[in-house]
Amino acid sequence: MKLVVASIMKFHEIEMQDYLDFLQEVLIPEDRLQARIGELAAEISADYEGKPLMLACILRGGVLFLTDLMRALTIPHTIDFMAVSSYGAGARESSGNVRITLDLQTSVEGKDVLLVEDIIDSGHTIASVIQLLQTRQPRSLRVCTLLDKLERREADVPIHYRGFEIPNKFVFGYGLDLDEYHRNLPFIGVVRPDKYVPPD
Ligand code: IMP
Ligand code: MG
């Protein structure tokens, strides 16, 4: 009992800013997100009918999108996860150097693989993942991203399914983080950098 009380106290000691303090605007509200995900799922369900579809989600940002997308699919499919980190650049810039920190647990050979991403920015992350997975002989490999910051693109990435094209602003919510927090928000928000204070 003592332990439980102690951990709750500790949690309350962390000072977290209320997201309303630094939310500039809601760029995509929950109902528009969910409606668009429904459209993407219908398209994917038609395209992959009768095929061995495997959704490969890139952690951690893609998780909320994956879980809503898969619930809206009407065809059988499997899921798997991978994580990548980019190094050699600041926390909000990805460089061309991308490292796989968690690999898929299942084989992609002979499968129709759909990469599920939260956002494609410079494109380096997804370009590296595509390059790696192509060597493992999937039957097909396509990209499905919820958000596309096209203006920032540096790598040439073929995107087959795109939720929304967004302007060059830093966004958070619905899987996307601000220093690992706020992924749980059901909408996509734009941050006001002059108001945001990173947690310790
Ligand atoms: P890329 O390699 O530059 O395309 O970076 C893609 C990754 O950067 C995404 O998977 C996100 O994790 C992160 N990212 C890029 N833009 C944003 C943003 O506006 N908010 C939160 N994360 C972002
Ligand atoms: Mg991501």
Image (cartoon, rainbow, N blue to C red):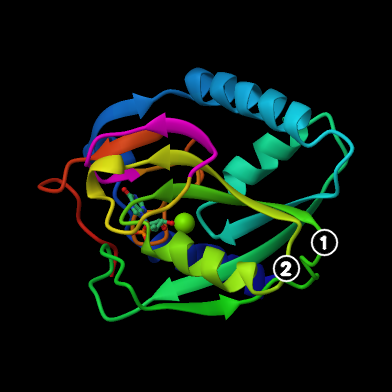
Would you place residue 78 above or below residue 110 in this image? above
Residue type beneath disc 1? Gly
Please name whichever residue, 113 or 197, is drawn nearer the observer in this view of the structure: 113
Query: Where, by quadrant of the figure, is residue 200 drawn?
Result: bottom left
Report the residue marked by disc 2.
Answer: 137
- Helix, strand or loop at mark 1: loop
Residue at 31% across / 56% down in the picture? Answer: 122
Report the residue marked by disc 1.
Answer: 110
State the mark number for residue 73: none
Magenta span of residues: 159-171
Query: Where, by quadrant of the figure, is residue 90 drawn?
Result: bottom left
Q: Are marks 2 and 1 in contact (CB under 8 Å)?
A: yes
Q: Where is residue 186 drawn, in percent x and y?
A: 50, 33
Would you place residue 175 above or below residue 28 in this image? below
Q: Where is residue 88 drawn, in percent x and y?
A: 27, 81
User: Counting residues from the N terminus, which is met first, the one under dot 2 or under dot 1?
Assistant: 1
Marks 2/1: CA distance? 6 Å
Residue at 26% across / 46% down in the picture? Answer: 170
Would you place residue 1 above or below residue 145 in this image? below
